[in-house]
């Protein structure tokens, strides 16, 4: 009999289907629950974190560089200006392959190796949201070429940034200094938050000394940007704080006159107010154009300045050290009075030379036949070397060193300019330490007339002269007169103590009178003609090439750079000094030439500065108000121009070797 099986088991199929439905619902419910939990985790528990991350892709905090403070002279003449330039910048957040981008930009923007090196050094430490400059001061051709291919360079833009301009070029280069691109060493030392968005920093001069005042405080701006880094809208802003404006003690007109005296020559002039220590003029010649350094000087141009035999980058006024020659005789003579070794009646017989006891070597006076009977007053007027040879033998080098250091020799003056040299007032301890040799008696004799190993800067000579004018009261030379802005800064003006002196006030007056007679009848009488005020001065001659014993000075056998340096120090009016001055004229053939340079400077300050002041012309003043893209080299020259126009009031290196010191052999003085 045949068996029949049902075609399907309905009950079993229903059971299987029901089980599958339950499993499916369970799986869907599980994953849905998992999705809800994950969604809650992202949207509730970690909302702040992911909202911030999302905003970072859309909203950025961009630094706003502060405007640098302006620099003016004492009368409000603008010495350091700000002007806008077009700058190519790159945002790290919007560029994946920075090296490839720079390589593609090189022919478009004509980037040099120096441009690329500067960019690479800065990009290493830049924040991800920071825009780093690729090239400053783009011209119209650069901008036009980039505009055609802008769409290919996401994160690269052309912006307007402020940079520095020095409208008077070489005139104030050594004292104002300049700003330049921040280098690797400076990046390690500066506060990166304080310099966010900033490319420039003070390198030398006032720009470096007062960087903390001039720089200001950066701000920031919150912006919404698209995927290409283009700003869509501004969301918020914290304004930067502009740097302080600095008003210097320098006088534009006096600086012009002093620069004219040294035009085409090597030397330095420092003039200061002996009552306050304010530096009125500071000139080092030759000079250089500081505008070349602002956006980055080329290797070729820098090498030309660095290798120039006349050393234009060298600040002779502050860094240059020279044998001071006879200019220190008034200070040294007062030392003899201080120690009670001489008085104003002490006299010697000058036969034209001096010999140490037991030694046949003759230390010659500059006058071969001698000056006869000479006292302190006459010794200053005729600059008798022999008198000071005798005095140094009595005093000894240790006492000489102690006394002369009180005038600031072999010490920093405290001037508010960087890289100041101390010069050298030698001593037995110094010679043993540096040369491992004993001090020789003859070296003391040479030092007594500012020769031998004795060197000083023009600034030190000006300060020592000011102390003499002040009858022993000390001053600290400085160029900052006033600071105006958000950061308070107080400038100290005036005297700060008095040197220890065992003489009387009358001794200071007698030394002043002797210095007056230097101009009236002595070695400085070449400038006395037509004087309308009294000058107390002292000439000096610093020997560059030694003269062998028994030989005479023969200028015809020397090269131009072997000729004697000429020096002059003085103050005026002698009875109530308003200005003290130091002049060094390299290879000037003696003190007379340097003395002649001082007269126009003193005349301007005492006779002409009020009734006929020198001011920059209107063209020079407007020259600093430039439009974006113009280079300083395209502007009219501003150097040395004179005008009586009232100035507009704007509201908005390794150092080369120092000049050679004179050897300590036989001396020929003025």
Image: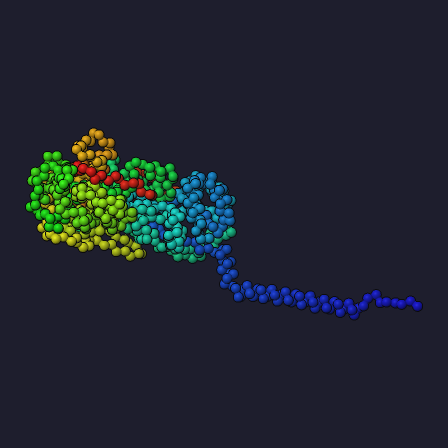
Q: With respect to residue 201, does 350 lie above or below? A: above
Please report the residue visible at 27 percent of the width from the left and 56 percent of the height from the top.
489
Residue at 41% x, 55% y: name it.
220
Colour convention of the picture = rainbow
Residue lying farthest front?
A: 358
The quadrant in which residue 312 appears is top left
Q: Please give left or right for residue 106 compared with residue 461 in the image.
A: right
How many numbered marks, from 0 up?
A: 0
Residue at the image position 25 percent from the left and 39 percent from the top: 660
Within the image, what quadrant is residue 109 found in?
top left
Quadrant in the picture for the N terminus: bottom right
In this view, the residue in front, 429 or 241, is: 429
Q: Is residue 330 visible?
A: no
Q: Which x, y percent locates residue 529?
A: 12, 37
Rendered location of residue 553, percent (x, y): 18, 33
Q: Is residue 162 left or right of residue 228?
A: left
Residue 609 position in % (x across, y down): 19, 44
- Residue, far right: 1
Quadrant containing the C terminus is top left
Residue nearest the observer in this picture, 102 or 331 = 331
For residue 116, what is the image quadrant?
Answer: top left
- Camera-side residue: 353 or 456? 353
Q: Nearer the viewer, residue 330 or 228?
A: 330
Seen at 69% across and 66% down, the residue is: 24
Q: Find residue 599 and report its horizontal and vertical position in percent.
A: 17, 40
**Can you name the residue that lies furthest to the top here?**
556
Q: Does residue 504 show up? A: yes
């Amino acid at each position: 009999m045949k068996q029949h099986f049902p075609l399907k088991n309905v009950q079993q199929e229903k059971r299987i289907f029901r089980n599958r439905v339950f499993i499916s619902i369970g799986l869907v419910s599980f994953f849905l629950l998992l999705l809800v939990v994950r969604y809650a985790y992202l949207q509730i528990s970690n909302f702040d974190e992911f909202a911030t991350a999302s905003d970072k892709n859309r909203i950025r905090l961009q630094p706003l560089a502060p405007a640098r403070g302006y620099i003016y002279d004492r009368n409000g003449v603008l010495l350091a200006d700000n002007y806008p330039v077009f700058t190519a910048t790159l945002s790290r957040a919007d560029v994946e392959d920075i090296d490839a981008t720079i390589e593609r930009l090189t022919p478009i923007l004509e980037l040099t190796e120096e441009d690329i090196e500067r960019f690479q050094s800065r990009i290493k430490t830049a924040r991800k949201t920071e825009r780093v400059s690729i090239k400053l001061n783009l011209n119209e051709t650069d901008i036009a070429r980039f505009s055609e291919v802008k769409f290919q360079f996401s994160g690269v833009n052309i912006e307007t940034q402020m940079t520095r301009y020095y409208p008077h070029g070489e005139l104030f280069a050594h004292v104002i200094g300049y700003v330049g691109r921040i280098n690797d060493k400076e990046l390690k030392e500066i506060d990166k938050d304080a310099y966010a968005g900033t490319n420039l920093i003070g390198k030398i001069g006032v720009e470096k000394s007062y960087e903390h005042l001039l720089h200001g405080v950066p701000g920031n701006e919150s912006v919404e940007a698209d995927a290409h880094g283009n700003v869509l809208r501004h969301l918020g802003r914290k304004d930067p704080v502009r740097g302080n404006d600095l008003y210097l003690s320098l006088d534009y007109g006096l600086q012009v006159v002093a620069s004219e005296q040294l035009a085409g020559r090597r030397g330095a002039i420092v003039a200061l107010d002996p009552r306050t220590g304010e530096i009125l003029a500071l000139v080092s010649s030759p000079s250089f154009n500081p505008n070349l350094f602002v956006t980055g000087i080329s290797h070729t141009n820098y090498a030309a300045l660095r290798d120039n035999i006349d050393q234009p980058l060298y600040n002779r006024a502050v860094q240059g050290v020279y044998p001071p020659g006879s200019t220190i005789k008034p200070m040294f003579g007062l030392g003899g009075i201080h120690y009670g070794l001489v008085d104003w009646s002490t006299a010697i017989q000058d036969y034209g030379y001096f010999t140490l006891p037991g030694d046949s070597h003759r230390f010659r006076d500059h006058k071969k036949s001698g000056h006869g009977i000479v006292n302190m007053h006459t010794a200053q007027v005729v600059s008798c070397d022999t008198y000071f040879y005798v005095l140094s033998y009595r005093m000894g080098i240790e006492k000489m060193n102690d006394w002369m250091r009180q005038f600031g020799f072999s010490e920093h003056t405290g001037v508010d300019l960087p890289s100041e040299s101390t010069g050298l007032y030698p001593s037995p301890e110094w010679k043993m330490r540096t040369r491992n040799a004993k001090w020789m008696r003859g070296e003391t004799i040479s030092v007594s007339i500012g020769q031998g190993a004795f060197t000083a800067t023009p600034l030190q000579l000006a300060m020592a002269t000011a102390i003499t004018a002040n009858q022993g009261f000390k001053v600290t030379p400085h160029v900052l007169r006033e600071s105006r802005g958000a950061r308070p800064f107080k400038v100290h003006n005036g005297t700060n103590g008095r040197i220890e002196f065992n003489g009387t006030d009358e001794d200071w007056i007698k030394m002043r009178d002797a210095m007056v007679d230097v101009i009236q009848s002595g070695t400085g009488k070449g400038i006395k003609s037509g004087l309308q005020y009294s000058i107390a001065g002292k000439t000096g001659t610093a020997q560059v090439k030694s003269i062998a014993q028994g030989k005479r000075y023969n200028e015809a056998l020397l090269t131009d750079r072997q000729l004697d340096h000429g020096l002059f120090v003085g103050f005026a009016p002698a009875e109530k000094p308003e200005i003290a001055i130091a002049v060094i004229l390299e290879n000037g053939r003696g003190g007379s030439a340097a003395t002649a340079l001082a007269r126009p400077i003193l005349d301007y300050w005492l006779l002409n500065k009020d009734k006929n002041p020198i001011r920059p012309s209107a063209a020079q003043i407007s020259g600093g108000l430039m439009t974006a893209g113009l280079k300083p080299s395209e502007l009219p020259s501003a150097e040395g121009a004179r005008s009586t126009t009232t100035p507009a009031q704007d509201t908005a290196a390794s150092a080369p070797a120092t000049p050679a010191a004179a050897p300590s052999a036989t001396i020929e003085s003025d």
